[in-house]
Image: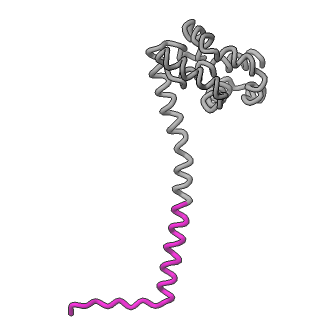
């Protein structure tokens, strides 16, 4: 009476294994979808960090619409981002695709995303990092004030 014997037929075993494989395949697809939907969380946390840093530095007003303060415009000029955007204006506006949107919030969102993900040339990126470090601000905040400036240019050109 110490032994328990379970008899499983080959058909039942193959059916159970097939079901487990199907469930694993389905679950993998669900988890993959979950992983790709975490980008909104990353973007939200980034927004919170930028806004928290802006409370200290006061480089832009968080009213509607978001606008640069005098200090923010001064930092934009000193960092070299104003001249960079002015120089690459056509390329950035075409990447922004500003003519297709009449919604100012959508235009602002695209400008913020474009500058947040824009790859600067090595020399420019190094200069921005050095400027941010020397002035005690993050490069993300520098990118945000550049995005506000680009959004203003796109709004005026429409």
The residue sitting at the top extreme is 70
Q: Is residue 100 magenta?
A: no
Bounds of the magenta span? 1-28
Looking at the picture, the colour scheme in use is: one colour
Vertical side of 114 occupied by 2: above or below: below
Nearest the eye: 156 or 70: 70
Nearest the eye: 107 or 94: 94
Nearest the eye: 107 or 93: 93
| Quadrant including the N terminus | bottom left
Q: Position of residue 75 (x, y in %)?
A: 57, 11
Vertical side of 38 occupied by 95: above or below: above
Q: Residue at x 54, y 25 (%)?
A: 140
Judged left or right of residue 85, residue 31 is left
Residue 103, image quadrant: top right
Q: Residue at x 57, y 6 (%)?
A: 70
Q: Is residue 14 magenta?
A: yes
Q: Position of residue 20 (x, y in %)?
A: 49, 73
> Can residue 68 be seen at all in this image of the molecule?
no
Q: Position of residue 58 (x, y in %)?
A: 49, 12
């Amino acid at each position: 009476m110490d032994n328990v014997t379970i008899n499983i037929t080959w058909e039942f075993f193959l059916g159970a294994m097939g079901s487990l494989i199907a469930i694993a395949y389905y679950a993998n697809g669900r988890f993959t979808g979950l992983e790709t939907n975490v980008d909104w969380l990353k973007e939200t946390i980034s927004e919170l960090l930028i806004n928290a840093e802006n409370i200290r530095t006061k480089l832009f007003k968080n009213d509607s619409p978001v606008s640069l303060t005098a200090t923010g415009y001064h930092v934009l000029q000193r960092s070299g981002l104003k001249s960079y955007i002015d120089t690459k204006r056509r390329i950035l506006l075409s990447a922004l695709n500003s003519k297709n949107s009449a919604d100012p919030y959508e235009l602002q969102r695209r400008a913020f995303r474009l500058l947040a993900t824009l790859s600067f040339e090595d020399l420019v990126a190094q200069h921005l990092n050095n400027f941010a470090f020397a002035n005690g601000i993050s490069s993300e905040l520098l990118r945000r004030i550049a995005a506000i400036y680009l959004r203003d240019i796109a709004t005026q050109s429409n």
